[in-house]
Image: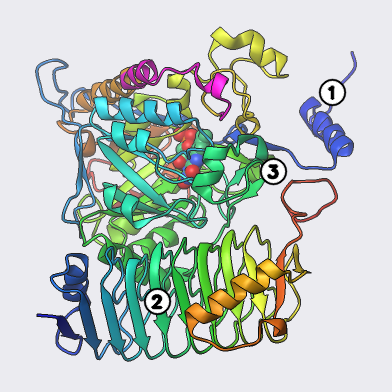
């Protein structure tokens, strides 16, 4: 039997060959594909003798969330804590953006612009629209800022903390180029640093300016890629953030170097407890400043786990695209013709998406009907919400927000250490000192 | 009443900006700004504002149609993301003056610090004195005129903006090159100087712009 190398596996060999052939690094979409400790490594305990469950169809389990009530005159009031993450017009077609707005609005949640400005289609179809304020400031203008329901200052993304956006020439159509004030067809890199502020002290003044321009009406979010999350969250709050968005390393992207996606940032699971601890120490957790978590959210179980660890809401990118029709088996033959397969297509940078979502090609984009796409997304968002409610009721919670770390255990030592919940069947949380201290910090009092 | 006066020694910036966003008169005067931030930010009509003193960060930020004159110096991000209108400052400006601005005219009678015109998207910027390093970084569109010197890294990663400098230029930024000054450039330069109220011989200026070598990721380029 010929033996394959564990160090030089087939994928590694193929990448070395590709690099030697082309002399350019690999740029792709999607998020980290490697396995990292994730929500799958956590389980809920559920109720039995010592906890009291709620009846599925009779007893209330609320899901609404208010975002940004610290400073803004008009905070967002969403019916479900599952929001749609920022994805740019440019990366996505105008139809896809519109579909995201339709789906989100149907279930009473928010959607978010991206690194390419606000389109009338998405504003028109979105009940709650968050307007991103990015380093590139493509298409940024005060009229759209005033039309937004919230402002999200983006410092980074989980897929590429410390990196700026990319959009390759094949996706820079005349409309995209016009909105970004760039020549059509160029390979565009967005800046990774904001042009007019550096550091938290400046950011405080920048946020003040944004509030002044919009007459203190709108919540201001700050989005960071998960890295030094504990400190970043504290600094974002000090700078005035009403909502902090933390995006883990599994988070999706439209176009980033593969080496960046796979090797920079920390898993979502490791980031949430750090963010929650920062807010707790500031006395703002669960009231004052809200925490939105993203990066690899796929199911209602993931939503419930993120919230139990301390999130007030979550955001989804990749899963929302899949709900619209991304990677659909319907286009299997076309994915194969592109050298990919339905289920592993990640060339969002390429602009030839058979499903018509990550493209600016008018013919491909026309394949996605925004009304049908919106309906599918709304269905999916309803399922996520109902699944999360199912779990919350089983844990005896009348609101998703009442889920807590005490409801969780971990399946692996790594997940226990990162999520700061005990390994299932034990009282052991690696890395948090002695057992007595552990049970007191967990606050439940019933441990031995 | 023709004109309203706001004394920031005893009124808040919030009260000032709220009035400027829903103006009851056409012209305003601001006294004792004393370095306050976001003075006259978010104007969206054709009002005139005279600021008597020094301002902090983001003065006239996102200005859309207003005429703002500062009789003093300005902190970081003067007229950032301006859409239209005119911002004129009698003194010097700190970093990132005119950052990402889409339109309008920004006149800095003194000098500007680093990153003047960073990511500019269509604004016209005229600087009577010099600009610091990394000015016009990633400048996408619009025109920048510098009557003094420009620091190192001018026009790094520049797109389609046009830069005119009268004095010395440090090391040029990546993909920024000197270009021929043709008649159409002399004409637009003369127009910009006249609009700014500055009197210089256009023949003394040199033009810089993009070599357009970074527009496509290429093997061996080393800078994507
Ligand atoms: C196609 C695509 C485009 C994106 N564009 C942006 C963007 O413009 N700005 C931004 O902050 N994040 C962007 N993101 C990241 C998302 O906002 C979000 O952080 C991420 O998708 C969440 O992880 P998930 O994909 O695992 O749900 C993009 C993601 C995708 C998949």
Magenta stretch: residue A372 in it?
Answer: yes
Q: CA distance from mark 2 to mark 1?
A: 67 Å
**Mark 2 and 3 residues: CB-CB less than 8 Å, in contact?**
no
Residue closest to the eye, A58 or B152? B152
Quadrant in the rendering for residue A349: top right
Pointer 2 residue: B87
Judging from the image, what secondary structure is the residue with disc 3 in?
helix
Label 2 sits on a secondary structure element that is strand
Q: Nearer the viewer, mark 1 or mark 3?
A: 3
Does residue A426 sit above or below A228 in this rendering?
above
> Which chain does the numbered disc 3 sit on?
A
The answer to whether marks 2 and 3 sit on the same chain is no
Image coordinates for residue A412, horizontal then vertical, percent: 50, 33
**Distance of label 2 from label 3 (alpha carbons):** 44 Å
For residue A209, side relative to residue A165 (left or right): left
- Mark 2–mark 1 contact, CB under 8 Å? no
| Residue situated in front as seen by the camera: A375 or B103 | B103
**Residue at the (15%, 26%) spot, across then down:** A52
Mark 2 or 1: the one toward you: 2
Point out residue A247 in the picture as x, y percentages from the top left corner. Answer: 46, 45
Q: Which residue is mark 3?
A: A259
* Chain under numbered label 1: A
Q: Circle 1 sits in a helix, a strand or a loop, which is it?
A: loop
* Mark in the foreground, 2 or 3: 2
- Residue at the spot x=40%, y=43% of the render? A118
Mark linked to residue A4: 1
Do marks 1 and 3 both belong to one polypeptide chain? yes
Q: Earlier in the sequence, mark 1 or mark 3?
A: 1
Residue A37 visible at all:
no
């Amino acid at each position: 039997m010929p033996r394959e190398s564990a160090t030089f596996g087939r994928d590694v060999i193929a990448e070395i060959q590709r690099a030697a052939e082309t002399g350019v690094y690999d740029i792709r979409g999607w998020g980290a594909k490697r396995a990292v400790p994730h929500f799958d490594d956590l389980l809920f305990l559920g109720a039995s003798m010592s906890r009291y469950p709620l009846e599925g169809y009779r007893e209330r389990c609320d899901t609404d969330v208010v975002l940004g009530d610290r400073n803004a005159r008009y905070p967002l009031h969403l019916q479900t804590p599952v929001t749609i993450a920022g994805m740019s017009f440019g990366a996505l077609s105008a139809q896809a953006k519109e579909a995201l707005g339709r789906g989100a609005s149907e279930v009473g949640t928010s959607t978010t612009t991206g690194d390419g400005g606000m389109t009338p289609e998405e504003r028109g179809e979105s009940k709650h629209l968050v307007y991103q304020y990015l380093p590139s400031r493509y298409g940024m203008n005060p009229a759209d800022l005033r039309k937004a329901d919230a402002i999200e200052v983006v410092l980074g993304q989980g897929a590429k903390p410390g990196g700026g956006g990319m959009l390759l020439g094949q996706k820079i159509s005349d409309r995209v180029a016009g909105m970004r004030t760039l020549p059509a067809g160029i390979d565009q890199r967005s800046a990774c640093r904001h042009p007019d502020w550096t550091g938290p002290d400046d950011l405080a003044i920048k946020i003040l300016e944004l509030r002044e321009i919009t007459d203190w009406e709108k919540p201001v979010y700050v989005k960071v890629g998960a890295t030094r999350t504990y400190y970043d969250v504290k600094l974002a709050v000090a700078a005035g953030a009403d909502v902090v968005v933390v995006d883990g390393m599994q988070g999706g992207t439209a176009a980033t170097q593969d080496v960046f996606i796979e090797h920079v940032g920390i898993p979502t699971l490791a980031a949430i407890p750090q963010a929650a601890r920062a807010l707790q120490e500031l006395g703002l957790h669960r009231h004052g400043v809200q925490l939105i978590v993203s990066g690899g959210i796929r199911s209602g179980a993931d939503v419930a786990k993120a919230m139990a660890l301390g999130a007030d809401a979550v955001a989804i990118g990749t899963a929302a695209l899949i709900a619209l029709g991304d990677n659909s088996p319907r286009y299997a033959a076309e994915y194969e013709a592109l050298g990919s397969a339905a289920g592993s297509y990640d060339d969002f940078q390429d602009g030839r998406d058979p499903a018509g979502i990550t493209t600016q090609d008018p013919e491909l984009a026309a394949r996605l009907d925004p009304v049908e796409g919106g309906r599918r997304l709304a269905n999916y968002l309803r399922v996520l919400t109902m699944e999360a409610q199912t779990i919350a009721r089983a844990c005896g919670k009348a609101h998703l927000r009442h889920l807590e770390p005490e409801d969780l255990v971990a399946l692996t030592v790594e997940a226990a250490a990162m999520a700061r919940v005990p390994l299932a069947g034990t009282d052991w949380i690696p890395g948090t000192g002695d057992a007595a201290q552990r049970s007191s910090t967990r606050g439940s009092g019933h441990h031995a | 009443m023709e004109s309203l006066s706001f004394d920031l020694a005893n009124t808040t910036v919030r009260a000032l900006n709220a009035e400027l966003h829903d103006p009851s008169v056409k012209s305003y005067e601001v006294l004792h700004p004393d370095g306050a931030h976001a003075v006259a930010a978010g104007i969206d009509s054709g009002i005139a504002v005279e600021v008597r003193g020094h301002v902090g960060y983001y003065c006239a930020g996102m200005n859309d149609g207003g005429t703002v004159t500062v009789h003093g110096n300005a902190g970081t991000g003067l007229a950032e993301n301006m859409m239209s209108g005119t911002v004129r400052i009698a003194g010097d400006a700190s970093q990132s003056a005119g950052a990402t601005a889409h339109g309008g005219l920004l006149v800095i009678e003194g000098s500007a610090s680093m990153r003047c015109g960073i990511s500019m998207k269509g604004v016209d910027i005229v600087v009577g004195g010099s600009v610091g390093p990394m000015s016009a970084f990633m400048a996408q569109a619009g025109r920048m005129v510098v009557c003094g010197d420009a620091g190192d890294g001018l026009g790094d990663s520049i797109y389609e903006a046009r830069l005119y400098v009268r004095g010395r230029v440090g090391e040029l930024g990546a993909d920024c090159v000197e270009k021929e000054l043709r008649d159409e450039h002399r004409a637009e330069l003369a127009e910009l100087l006249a609009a700014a109220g500055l009197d210089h011989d256009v023949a003394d200026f040199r033009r810089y712009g993009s070599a357009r070598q970074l527009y496509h990721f290429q093997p061996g380029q080393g800078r994507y």
